[in-house]
Amino acid sequence: HYVRKLFKDSSGGLYMFNASRSLVEPVVLWGSPPPKNEVFKQNDCWALRQGRPHFADDPENDLICPHCEQEIDKPYFCIPMIAYGDVMGVLHLRLHNQTRDQKHEKSADTVRQLAITASEHLALALANLRLREVLQAQSVRDPLTGLFNRRYMEESLDRELARCHRNKSKLGVIMLDIDYFKRFNDSYGHEAGDIVLQELGEFMIRIIRNEDIACRYGGEEFILIMPGIDEADFKTRVEEIRRNV
């Protein structure tokens, strides 16, 4: 909403690195016409490649980023969004009406400076949001297995039980306990025991339904909450999980 207001005479896009940082993906596109809704590699943007803003005031003669060279016919900016030393993505702006100091209109230089300032604020805001998500995940996730922790399990169980009462629906709860885990730890060491717990956590993440909630209850004990499952399917799933474990 705000980039549209800041750059009324422009079209553009906000692009972010994906989780693996192998590709840059469009998050927001605006303007008429907007840039193409396509992913591209880091080296396809001169700003990301060089780690500094890239300005193409004359598309016919200036260096054009490969991610837009087939369609660009207006001056454009690519400005990397950097926060806390980390490049998060790029702000891409195209100037449709490049006017100079007319009343109520920004000159290209003013727009350029505004775009740099906006990218700095966007990068900080997005970095803080990402940090908040990480902290939120750490507060409800078990760091070893990646499953939800006991605190989240208790909250979820209360919520799902209340939903069952309201909707007259079924709820399945499975408790898993690794047999002879202490003996395994004593024989092979705690690092080997951690590997067993991690493998079980990854297995549970792979096999659960989208609506299921997999948790590490504590130690070698795990809880799997399965909302809306009937008794026959539940028994089948329990045996299937036991066998695969």
Image: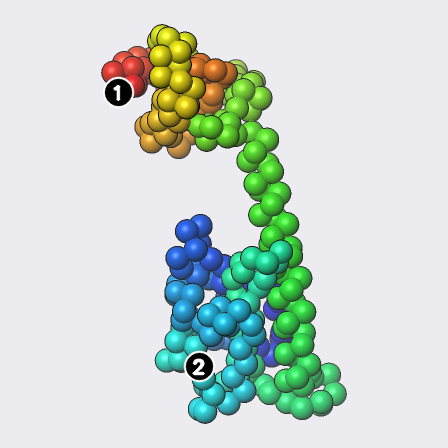
Q: Position of residue 97 (x, y in %)?
A: 58, 86
Q: Which residue is mark 1?
A: 244
Do we see residue 168 in this rendering? no
Mark 1 residue crowding within 10 angstroms, few (<14) / some (14–19) / many (20+): few
User: Please, is residue 89 above or below residue 92 in the view?
Assistant: above
Examine the image and state in which quarter residue 203 appears: top left
Give me the residue at 46% from left, 70% from top: 49
Which amino acid type is shown beneath numbered disc 2? Ile
Q: Position of residue 25 (x, y in %)?
A: 44, 60
Give me the residue at 40% from left, 14% from top: 185
Give me the residue at 37% from left, 8% from top: 183
Give me the residue at 44% from left, 14% from top: 221
Q: Position of residue 176 (x, y in %)?
A: 39, 13
Do we see residue 151 in this rendering? yes
User: Please, is residue 224 above or below residue 78 in the view?
Assistant: above
Q: Which residue is mark 2?
A: 64
Indicate which disc, 2 or 1, sits on the residue closer to the N terminus: 2
Q: Indicate the secondary structure of the residue bearing disc 2.
A: loop
Tell me: 174 left or right of 160.
Answer: left
Quadrant holding the N terminus: bottom right
Residue 4 or residue 181, whichever sits in front: 181
Which amino acid type is shown beneath numbered disc 1? Asn
Quadrant holding the C terminus: top left
Q: CA distance from mark 2 to mark 1?
A: 54 Å
Count of numbered tags? 2
Residue 184 or residue 239, whichever sits in front: 184
Examine the image and state in which quarter residue 234 appears: top left
